[in-house]
Amino acid sequence: MSGASSKYEGRLGTTAGPWRLESLLGAGATAAVYRAKSDAGDLAAVKVLHASLCADASMCERFRREAYLPAAVRHASIVRVLDDGLMADGCAYIALELIEGETLDDLKEKGGPLPLERVAPIARALLDAIAAVHGAGIIHRDLKPGNVLMTPQGELKLLDFGTARVLDDAGTPKLTRRGLVLGTPSFMAPEQALGRRDKVDAQSDVWSLGATLFTLLTGEFVHQERDAHSRLLATASKPARKIGTVAPTLPAAVGDVIDRALAYDKSQRWTSVVEMRDAFVAALQSAGVDATTEGTA
């Protein structure tokens, strides 16, 4: 048992509202996630903000946002929030629907690059889900394989709205502040990498979707640099590689959809996820690949 795990496992047996924490599912930079059960026998995944961050008002705001933003999206791929509040020590928690399955990162790591026939229905389901998120006036801002889970039944679930933002009526992100980089370097759009939060919008999620499909189909990141910081600098300063240079057997029409999603200049990108989805489905059909979203497992 690592020292970090031991620290987080110290919460086992304590309660978060009606939930008793039973086992540690994992821990990240901002929170630990526990399998929990209520007195009524209901199960949940309870996410608890790290104690070291609980005094930071901006972190608490970001954490709470994850509790209420997904509720605005009516789509089967959105994980339901069951409860949120404060633990006895004042740390914020969110209780989420407990979903069993594997992330797209897990699937990729098992077999390297995934064949287009495997990726196609997953991509269609993911594009549908993000279209619903954008339709609710929300941009995700941290789309990546690790935030997409596939259940044993083949259902796609979108995770982690902790960095999401609500758009105003003009389609502009609220509460923007220049100079702060949020997201995951290998999957964030150039404007995110540059810290231009005033320029981050639905088209930034389009870039992240393109980067996600690029990685699933090639087993590589868009930029080849060896560490996250170098990839961040590359994303901020130069265009993405064409996917056909890495996956030459990929149908050209499919590659064109992904390449356009990854355009450095936003004016050259798909204007919306819906536009990207429709083009992707048409490209799959022209290549004779099934884009049906049912039975994606």
Image (tube, grey):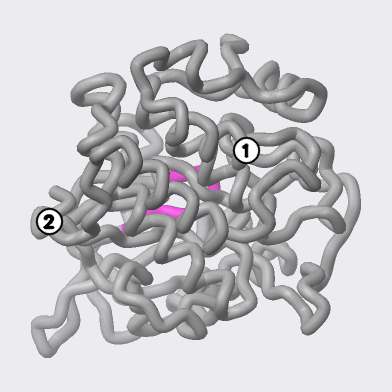
Residue at the image point whose x is 43% and y is 35% from the top: 254
The magenta stretch spans residue 111:
no
Where 138 sits versus 182, above or below?
A: below
Q: Which residue is mark 1?
A: 260
Q: Say which residue appears at 45% left-offset and 19% top-offset.
A: 220
| Inter-mark Cα distance, 2 to 1 | 28 Å
Q: Label 2, on which residue?
A: 295
In the image, the segment drawn in magenta is 28-33
Q: Is residue 146 left or right of residue 181?
A: left
Task: Left or right? Give the position of 177 relative to 289.
Answer: right
User: Which of labels 2 and 1 is toward the front?
Assistant: 1
Q: Element under label 2?
A: loop
In the image, residue 137 lies at what x, y percent? Answer: 63, 77
**Residue 198 place in picture, x, y as percent:** 86, 58
Q: Is residue 116 above or below residue 222?
A: below
Task: Give amino acid for label 2.
Answer: Gly
Secondary element under disc 1, as helix, strand or loop, is: helix
Q: Amino acid at mark 1?
A: Arg
Q: Quadrant of the N terminus?
A: top left
In the depicted view, which residue is nearer to us: 129 or 284? Answer: 284
